[in-house]
Amino acid sequence: MLHGSFRATGRGLCYDYDSNEALLSILNSATGRTLATFNLDHFLTKKPKDYVGFLEKASQVNALMLSNNSTINLADTVSESHLMSLLESVVGISRNAYDLNALDFCRFSRIFSKEYNLKSVKIKKFVSRNKENEFYIARLHTHHGNGVCVRGCTLTGIMAGLSDRTIRDLITMEFGHRFESSAHDLLNASTRLSSLSYILDQNFIPEHKITNESSNMTIKNPLTQKNTQ
């Protein structure tokens, strides 16, 4: 199903989607400058607004981390040139969030394992016979025979659990075997997993985490959308 073109405005960034070309542009709302442009693949074009929603939340979570919780506007935290390079990471993590939300664990695992030089990341969903309860089991393994396993009722919990176990146990194992390069990759992977736990958590609203008392703005929805086609 072909979804129509639209423009969505977030906090500091603007998203312009051309459905005919499956092309998404990210612009600086203040300057109007295009910061990044890329084609959405077949999976993303199924629900492009959902993907843009993850993009916006990922940018807000990044802004919180970079500004020590003083803003959710990523464009206010770094220079425009740095912002353009930072968006590469934002685009990547928002794709991870989109795949996880769609329960496309195979695609998430393939992309995540390659990016952080892991042997595998496996996530499985289990549902009780009466279908009233469900839970997830996730396993992360390095190329050196080390691994961790976590269980949780939500994907948010699974991501947070994997992040904690990676820091607490897996990095220690890799350092103990003098796999320093792998330990560095695992540190970055843990940070990504932690960020994903916030992005996937519908109860986590970045604006509510701002500690700057001068900010009294309220956002009911991180995006305002207008169809252009």
Image (cartoon, rainbow, N blue to C red):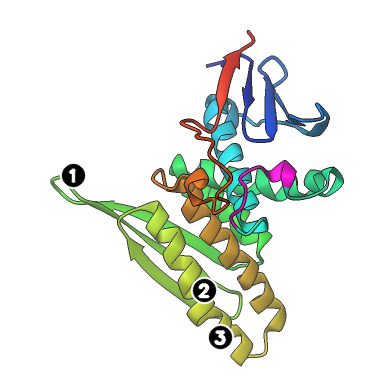
Task: Look at label 2 and name its amino acid.
Answer: Thr
State left or right for residue 147 relative to residue 89: left
Q: Dot 3, crowdedness within 10 Å: few (<14), some or many (≥20)?
A: some
**Residue sitting at 54 percent across and 64 percent down?**
120
Mark sitting on residue 131: 1
User: Which SS class for mark 2?
Assistant: helix
The percent coordinates of residue 205 (x first, y second) are: 46, 44
Return the disc, 1 or 3, that comes first in the chain's sequence.
Answer: 1
Q: Dot 2, crowdedness within 10 Å: few (<14), some or many (≥20)?
A: many
Q: Is residue 63 above or below residue 181?
A: above
State left or right for residue 86 relative to residue 175: right
The percent coordinates of residue 204 (x first, y second) are: 43, 48
Res. 169 visible in picture: yes
Reply yes or no: does residue 75 show up in magenta.
yes
The residue range painted magenta reads 69-76
Q: Is residue 163 above or below residue 105?
A: below
Return the disc, 3 or 2, that comes first in the chain's sequence.
Answer: 2
Q: CA distance from mark 3 to mark 2?
A: 9 Å
Q: Nearer the viewer, residue 207 or 55?
A: 207
Q: CA distance from mark 1 to mark 3?
A: 38 Å
- Farthest residue in the right direction? 81
* Residue on which the image places disc 3: 172
* Residue on which the image places disc 2: 166
**Residue sitting at 73 percent across and 50 percent down?**
77
Q: Quadrant of the C terminus?
A: top right
Q: Main secondary structure of the magenta part?
A: loop
